Image: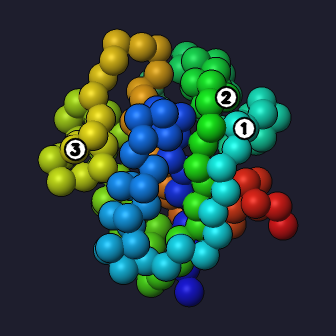
Amino acid sequence: IERTLVLVKPDGVARGLTGTILARVEAKGYRLVDLRQLVPGRELLAEHYAEHEGRPFYEPLLEFMASGPVVAAVFEGHRVIEGFRSLAGATDPTTAAPGTIRGDFGRDWGLAVQQNLVHGSDSPESAAREIGIWFGA
Ligand code: ATP
C-alpha cells in the first residue's frame, strides 16, 4: 500500500489548524500510521528541501520551516500521494481552489516564502526518502 509524508507547516500549527487538516485527510479515507510534532533543525530541513538549494526562496523557506513546531504525519492508502496533493490544492494559496486545504485556509501574506500550510510528497520515491528523514529508517 502506498504511503505519503504530510507536513502541517509552522503556519498551520500556529493557526491551530492541525486537527482540521488531519481530519480532512482521515475523512477522505486515508489511514494515519505515524505522527509527531517537532521544531525541525536546519540539517533536517536542508535534507528535505535539497532539490531547492540555490533557489531564491530557499533560505526564507528554511527559516520559515524552522520558525516553530511542524506536525509530520504518515498517511497510507491506495493512491494517497496523488489524493493528498489534490486535497492540498495548488502551491499558491491565493489561487488554490476553494475546497482544498490551501484554498480554504491559505492566503499570501506578502512574505518571501509561500506560507501554504502543508506539504505532501510528490512521488513514491520522495515519500520513502521524506518518511526516512522525518521518522528515521
Ligand atoms: P507543490 O508541489 O504542490 O507546489 P510543494 O510544497 O511540493 O507544493 P515546491 O515547489 O516543492 O512545493 O516548493 C516547496 C515550498 O517552497 C512550497 O510549498 C512553498 O512553501 C515554497 N515555495 C515554492 N515556490 C515558491 C516561490 N516561487 N516563492 C516563494 N515560496 C515558494
Counting from the top left corner in percent of width and height, residue 49 is at 65, 38
Counting from the top left corner in percent of width and height, residue 118 is at 45, 46
Residue 58 or 110: which is nearer the viewer? 110
Residue 102 falls in which quadrant of the image? top left
Residue at image point 44% right, 84% down: 78
- Residue 7 vertical placement versus 3 (above, below): above
Q: Find residue 94 and name its label.
A: none
Give the amino acid at mark 2: Ala
Give the amino acid at mark 1: Pro
Residue at image point 42% right, 41% down: 16
User: Mark 3: few, some, or many residues within 10 Å (few <14, many ≥20)?
Assistant: some
Residue located beneath label 3 in the image: 104
Residue 51 or 106: which is nearer the viewer? 106
Q: Are marks 2 and 1 in contact (CB under 8 Å)?
A: yes
Q: CA distance from mark 3 to mark 1?
A: 26 Å
Which is more N-terminal, label 3 or label 2?
Answer: 2
Residue located beneath label 2 in the image: 66
Residue at image point 53% right, 74% down: 32
- Identify the image quadrant of the N terminus: bottom right
Residue 122 or 104: which is nearer the viewer? 104
Residue 59 falls in which quadrant of the image? top right
Give the amino acid at mark 3: Asp
Residue 58 visible in this rendered orientation of the protein: no
Residue 128 falls in which quadrant of the image? bottom right
Q: CA distance from mark 2 to mark 1?
A: 6 Å
For label 3, the SS is helix
